[in-house]
Image (cartoon, coloured by chain):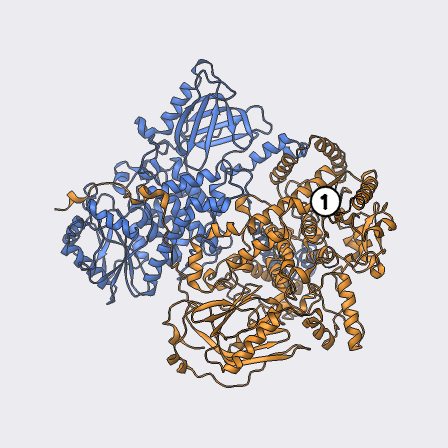
Amino acid sequence: MASSSAPKYNSHSLESSSIKRTLKDGANWEKSEEIPRLPGETRVTDKDVIYMCPFNGPVKGRVYITNYRLYLRSVENDPVVVLDVPLGVISRIEKMGGASSRGENSYGLDITCKDMRNLRFALKQEGHSRRDIFEVLTKHAFPQSHNLLFFAFANEEKFSENGWMVYNPMSEYRRQGLPNERWRVTFINEHYGLCDTYPSLLVVPYNATDDDLKKVAAFRSRNRIPGCNQVLSWIHPENQAVIMRCSQPLVGMSGKRNKDDERYLDIIREANGQISKLTIYDARPNVNAVANKATGGGYESEDAYPNAELFFLDIHNIHVMRESLKKLKDIVYPNVEESHWLSSLESTHWLEHIKLVLTGAIQVADKVSSGRSSVLVHCSDGWDRTAQLTSLAMLMLDSYYRTIEGFEVLVQKEWISFGHKFASRIGHGDKNHADADRSPIFLQFIDCVWQMSKQFPTAFEFNEQLLITILDHLYSCRFGTFLYNSESVREKEKVTEKTLSLWSLINSEKSKYTNPFYSKELNRALYPVASMRHLELWVNYYIRWNPRIRQQQPNPVEQRYMELLALRDDYMRRLEELQITNNSKISNSSASSTSPSQMMSQIQTHF
Amino acid sequence: MLGSGAKAAKPSFVSYISPEEIHVKEPIEKEVNPHLLPGEQLLCEASTVYKYIQEDGSNRGTYGKLVCTNFKIAFLDDDSTSDDNEPQFKNKIIGENDITLQCVDQIYGVYDEKKKLLTGQLRKYPEKLIIYCKDLRVFNFCLRYTKEEEVKRIVSGIIHHSQTPKLLKRLFLFSYASAAPNNTDARNQTVMFDTLEDWRDELERTKGNVQYKAVSTNEGYRVSEKLPLYFVVPICVSEESILKYEGRGIPIWCWSCHNGAALLKMSAFPKEQDDSASQMQKAFLDGIYRTIRKPPYELLKTDDLSSSLPSLQEIQTAYTRFKQLFLIDNSTDFWATDVKWFSLLESTNWLEIIRRVLKKAIEVVECLERQHTNVLLIEENATDLCCVISSLVQVMMDSYSRTKLGFQSLIQKEWVIGGHGFLDRCNHLHKSDKEEAPVFLLLLNCVWQLVQQYPPAFEFTETYLTVLSDSLYVPIFSTFFFNSQHQKDTTATGESLKTQSGPFRFLTVWDWSVQFDLKAQAFLNNPLYAEKPKPEKSQRKTARFKHQRQLSLPLTQTKSSPKRGFFREETDHLIKNILGKRIGKFINSSDEPPNNFREFYDSWHSKPVDYHGLLLPRIDGPEIKVWAQRYLRWIPEAQLHGGGTIATAAKILDLMEEVQNLQVKMDEEHSQAVSGGIHAVPMLRNSARLSSLFPFALLQRQSVKPALPTSTWKDLEDEDDLVKRDDEFVDLSSDIL
C-alpha cells in the first residue's frame, strides 16, 4: 500500500490513515479518478469546497452532487480523502455564516445526517458561491418536498436475485401451517377497505366471519385509519398459541364497550384450545394508556374482558425515543465523552429503552412458548411498539427468522406489510426535519436484534454487516423497500414494479452478510438477558465515524475461524486425494503433496 | 434436593422455608467425610445445615454438613448423587462448595430478617450465615435445623479461623508443605528469577547486558530485606552506592526495549525531617542521575507514580465498592441494581482507575518506543504501582510476555521476586486493613482489557487470568503468600528447623497440574493465539530478532507488512532510532507531553495490528469494560443459555479438533498404516447449549425460563411532557359512533 512508504510518525500520514480506516462507511481514499456512479445515477453539479473534518481538520476538495449522492474527493491530500454520502441520509441543510462573516472557513453549509453524523463544508465567500449548491442539494435531498421522485425510481441497477420475491404472505403462513381448522385466510382487506394500513391478506380465527371483522374494526379504529383489527402474526407449531397484533380499543372517557370486540377476543382465546385467559400486552406505560382515554383510546378493562389478563410493558412513546437518540448523538459525535462515559450513556436512556423493549418481547415470547395462553399485543396505533414486540418475540421463538432469508421475511412482514410508517418515521425525502412524527423505532428494533446476536453469537445466520446495511438503506432511498407508509400506498406507487428491493442487493452477495459461527438449531427459543450487565452500546454503528474508536474489521476471531475452515476443507480435499491414490495402489504419488505433519506443526496443539 | 415444595416463598434472602416443609425430605444422617489434603485438620463441624441454591430466589437447596478445617470451609452435600456428571472444568484442590479460609471476604449473620456483619465474639448466634467470598461467590447457609451446640461451634470456628488475625506460621502453607513434601518436578519452565543466572539470561534476552549488570550485592540480605537476593542495576552504579541507603535511590532495571531504552524503577527516599540528611540524599541522587544520564545511557525521564496515579487507598476504596456490585444476594437484588447499573459502575471509580493505569502505561511506552528515552518509575518502595506499570509496559511491548511462560516469568520477576507485599496487600493474615489493596488484581484487570481487545495476541485466555486471580487465595502455593523473598527464605528455614525436615519446598502456582487436570488446563490456552516459533530455551533468547511473523496457519493472507512494534526490519529500526532521538530531544524541550501521547496513540491505532508487535490498549470510554467472566460468573441471572463468547470459542475448539483428526487420518493414509484409532477426545459436547458462565457456572439452570427484570420502570423526570404525549396526537373520540 502506498502509505507504508510514508514516514512513520509524521502527522500527515496519521491523519490520512485514520480517515482511511473509515473505509467501509464512505470516507476512504481511492487511487482512481472515477466518481462512482450507479446505473441511473446522473451528475448534477460540482464545486470546490473545504470539508471541515471533525477528526482531522479542514480538507480541501471537490464535491460532486448527483441525483443519488454527495461525493467529495480531496485535492491536496495524499492519499486522497473521500466522502460518499447518499442524499437520502440528509436530514437538514443549513447555511452557516454570512457573506460578511469573518474568520477562516466560517461561510458554508452545515448538513445534519440521519445516520449519526454531521458534515460541514466551507466555501469561498465571494459571489454567493453557496447559493446554487444549497439549492441543488435541497432539491435532490428532499425530492418529496419538490415534487420529484425518489432515486429508487431512477435506479437501474441489475442484481442476480429479485428481492421482491422474498416475501410471499401466503407461503409464509403456509410455512407456519396456516390456514388450519382454527384459523383462516381472509381477503376482506383486498382493496384496503377494512384497514388501509394493513396488508391485503390477513389471518383471522376460523369462527369469526368477515362481518364480525368489520364490526370489530370500527371499535379498533381512529378516524384517519379505519380498521385495525386483531390479526395473527405467528402461531406456535406445537402448542398452537398465537401472537396477535392490533391497535388500542376505542374505549374513551365514558368507558365504551363493544360486544363484537369482546366476543372476537374470546374467539381468539378459544382458538388454541386452551381454557385459560387470553393475555393482552399493552406496550405503553400504564399512565399513558389511562391518559389515552381522554382522546378516545384506552385499554381493555377487566369488566368488559373478564377472560383476558392485561399487562403494561412500560415502553415509552416515539417522542421519548427520538429525544433519547438525540442525546446519544450528543455524547458520541463528533467526540466520545471520555471520563464520564458510563453516566453520560445512562443519561441518554437509550439502552434503558432497549432493555424495556427486549423485556417486553421476552414476556410475549415466554407466554406463547409456555403454551398456556395466546397473546394479543397492542400499543396506541399498533405499528410502532407493537411491531417491535411481535417481531422480536418471533425472532426469539422461531429460528427461521434468524436466517438471512427469514429475517428479510420478518422485516417485510411485521414492519413493511403491517404498516410501520417508514415514510413518517424516517422522513424520506422530506425537508421538514423537525417533524414530530419522526422517530428511530426501526433503528431501535435493529439495535435489539444486534444485542441478541451479540449475546448469542452462533444463533444468527447473518452478521452485523447485514444490520448496518439495512440501516444504511433505510435512509438511502436507493431501494423501494422502506419507502412509504403502508402496503396500500406502495401498491398505488407501483413500488415493486418501478424500484428494486434491498434484498436483491443482499441476496446477490450473501457471503458478505453471513456469520461463519452460525449453527443451525431448530425450534429453540432464544431468550436474551435484558440486563444492563449484558446490554452494550452498538459502537460499530453509533460511533463508526470516529476513527479513534475500534472497528476491528475483519473481526480477528472470525478471521481465525475462517482460516481454520479453509484449512479443514483443504485437508479434506487432500485426504480424499490420498485415499484415491492409495486405493488405486499407485505408490509413486507422494510428490504432489507435502507431508501433513509438516503443515500441522504450524497449528498449535493444546490437546 | 428439596423439590419445588419450598418454592412458594418470596424471592428474598429473609424468607425461609416454613417448618412444615421440612418433612418434605428428612435429612439423612449419613456419614459424609470431608476430603482432606495432607496436613489438613478438621476443626469443627455442624450437620443438618441447609444450603440455599441461589438460583431463582426460591428457597430450594440441599441439606448437608458444614465443616471448617485449617484450610477451608466446606459444605458436604448429604445427597452426593450429583457425582456422575463431573464438570469439565474442575479444580482438584477446591471443590465447588469449598471456601479456603483466605478466600472468605465477609461473613454476615441473619437475625430476625436483619443482616449483621460478624467479626469477633458473638453473643447471639444467627439463624442464617451468608459468606461472601473474594472470588465473588456468595453462600447462604440456614442454621435453623442445626443443633444449637453445633451452631455455636461452627459459627465461632469459622469466624475465628477466617476473620481474626493469625500468625504467618499458622498459614496452611506450612502444614501442607511439611505433610506433603514437594516432589513435583522442580524444573518448572517458568523463569523464577531466584538465581543470578535467571537475571543474566533476561539481560541477554533483551540485549540489556551492555549497559546493565546483575548483582549479588544483596546476598545474605546485607543491603535490604525488601530487595531480592539478585537484581540488575546500571553498570556504572557501584556496590557502595547500593549499600549506602539500603538500596533506596538506586535505579533498578526492569526491562530493556529493542532500541536499547530501558525501564527502571527506584524506591524513593522517605520524607526526611533532618535537613542535612535530605541534603545528602539529594546530593546522592544527583550523583546517580549524573552517571546514568550520560552516554551510553539514553535520556532519562522520571515518573513519580505516587503523584501521577491514584493512591493505594483510592484503589482499595474503588475495588471495595466495585466488587460489592457483584455480590448479589438474590434475583431482586440483581434487578434492583440493574436500573442504575452504569452510574453505579461509574461511581465505584474502578474502571476509571483501570483507564488511568493503562494510559500511564501507554505514556511510558511512548517514551521508550518513540522518544527512545529511559524511563525511571519512582514509588516509595517500588513494589506496588511500579509493578503494575512495568508489567503492563512489558506485556504491551514484549510479545514474549504474552505467552503463558513469559507472563508467568514476568509475574515472578516484577511481583514475586520484585517484592510486592502479597501477604499485606491481600491481608491474608488479617493483620491490618490499612495495608490491604488489590494491586495485583488491578494488573490482571488491565491485562484482561488487552486480552479482550486483542484476542489473537495472547497465548492464554481470560479463564487463565480468572483462575490466576482465584489462586491468590489458595494457601498451598507459596507464590502469593509472602511479602518478599527474604520473608519466604527466613520463614521457610526458621519453620523447618523446628520440624527438622530441612527447608520447606513449597509448591508454585505455575504448576497448573496441581489444580487442574490436562483436560481442564486446555481452557487456559487460547485457540486463537497466532503462535510464533516454539519458545525453546535456546531459541527464546534470539526470538526477538525473528522479523517475520510466523503464521501458525498456512492460509492467512499476507497482509501489508505492519511495520511497527518490536519486530521491525533492521534498517527501519536504525532510521527510527536516529529520528526517535531527535524527536525525543525536540519534544523534551517543547514540553508538551499530552499531545505526544495523543498523536502516538492515534498513529498506532490507525494502522493494522501486528499481534506480535507493540500492542496499545484502547482507552476511550466505551472500550474499557467489566471483566464479565470474573465478576458475573456466579450470578445465574446473568447467564446466557448457549450464548456468550464461549459459544464461538467452543466452535473454534471443535473445528480445531476436527482439523487435528483429519491430520491424523492423513498421516495414516500417508504411512498406509492400519488406522490406530487415536482420536482426540471431544472437548465440548453439545457446545451449543453451554452456559455463558462456562467453565465456571456452579449450577447450570435446567429450566429455559427467561430471566425477567422485576423492576424496570424508571421515571424520566426531565422529559415529563414528552412522556405524556401520544405517539401521534389525534382525537379519536369522534370516531366512536
User: Residue A21 location in percent, x, y?
Assistant: 56, 37
Q: Quadrant of the C terminus of chain A?
A: bottom right
Which residue is nearer to you in this view: B313 or A180?
B313
Q: Quadrant of the N terminus of chain A?
A: top right
Tell me which residue sits at (55%, 72%) in the image. B97
Q: Quadrant of residue A479?
A: top left
Residue A219 shown left or right of residue A325 in the figure:
left
User: Residue B336 location in percent, x, y?
Assistant: 42, 58
Which residue is nearer to you in this view: B405 or B296?
B296
Whether residue A582 appears in this view of the structure is: no
- The residue wearing badge 1 is B567
Task: Using the image, determine if residue A192 lies above or below residue B673.
Answer: above
Find chain A in the image and tell me its colour: blue
Q: Quadrant of residue B334?
A: bottom left
User: Residue A225 location in percent, x, y?
Assistant: 21, 43
Tell me which residue sits at (38%, 72%) in the image. B7
Chain letter, orange in picture = B
Task: Using the image, determine if residue A491 lies above or below residue B74.
Answer: above
Tell me which residue sits at (80%, 39%) in the image. B293
Residue A540 shown left or right of residue B407 in the figure:
left
Task: Using the image, determine if residue B221 lies above or below residue A82.
Answer: below
Task: Using the image, determine if residue B201 lies above or below residue A240.
Answer: above
Q: Quadrant of residue B597?
A: top right
Residue B566 shown left or right of residue A210 in the figure:
right
User: Residue A348 location in percent, x, y?
Assistant: 42, 44
Q: As drawn, which residue projects farthest toward the front?
A: B274
Chain where mark 1 sits: B
Which amino acid does the dot numbered 1 rest on?
Phe
Secondary structure at numbered mark 1 = loop
Q: As drawn, which residue projects farthest toward the top?
A: A127
Tell me which residue sits at (54%, 53%) in the image. B626
